[in-house]
Amino acid sequence: QVQLVESGGGLVQAGGSLRLSCAASGGIFSLNGMGWFRQAPGKEREFVAAINWNGGRTTYADVVKGRFTISRDNAKNTLFLHMNSLKPEDTGVYSCAAAYTATATIEKDEYNSWGQGTQVTVSS
């Protein structure tokens, strides 16, 4: 299984931007579909964005569509999430995950490797 480590979280004002990174090791990163999920306090983990093995296909949750962009650099074994126009409701712990398929899947059950997460806090 691939090991994943997120970075780039922090505190930002509403309307601001952040870029999250997810460094992968221990597996063949380029074979996996990848995703970002988030969990707010007292809520279940929810899907944010996913990308297929070569970056040719992406999918987003409706609440972030048009504001967030997922991308990957297979040469550097790194996944990214560019977040613009951030809102207080985007606050949460953001985790990257590797799927056991090569597709851009929204299903949590199709991910078998998870990072520890990075905190994103958006102030109003």
Image (cartoon, rainbow, N blue to C red):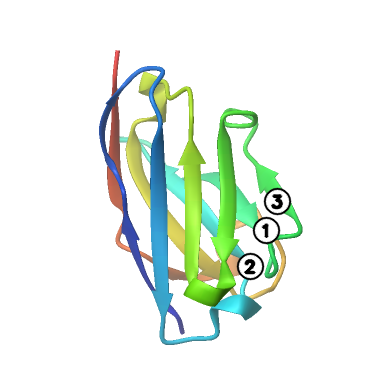
Q: Earlier in the sequence, mark 1 or mark 2?
A: 2
Q: Say which quarter of the image contains residue 52.
A: bottom right
Question: Against 60, is 34 above or below?
Answer: below
Q: Residue at x 64, y 31 (%)?
A: 65
Q: Residue at x 61, y 67 (%)?
A: 110
Query: How far across and how far down the image is residue 41, in percent?
Result: 29, 35
Query: How far across and how far down the image is residue 118, in percent?
Result: 29, 50
Within-10-Å neighbours for mark 1: few <14, some 14–19, many 20+: many
Query: How far across and how far down the image is residue 53, in percent?
Result: 68, 70
Residue type, label 1: Thr
Residue type, label 3: Thr
Query: How far across and how far down the image is residue 72, in percent?
Result: 57, 61
Q: Which mark is residue 105?
A: 1
Identify residue for label 2.
33
Distance, label 1 to label 2, CA atoms, is: 7 Å
Q: Earlier in the sequence, mark 3 or mark 1?
A: 3
Identify residue for label 3.
58
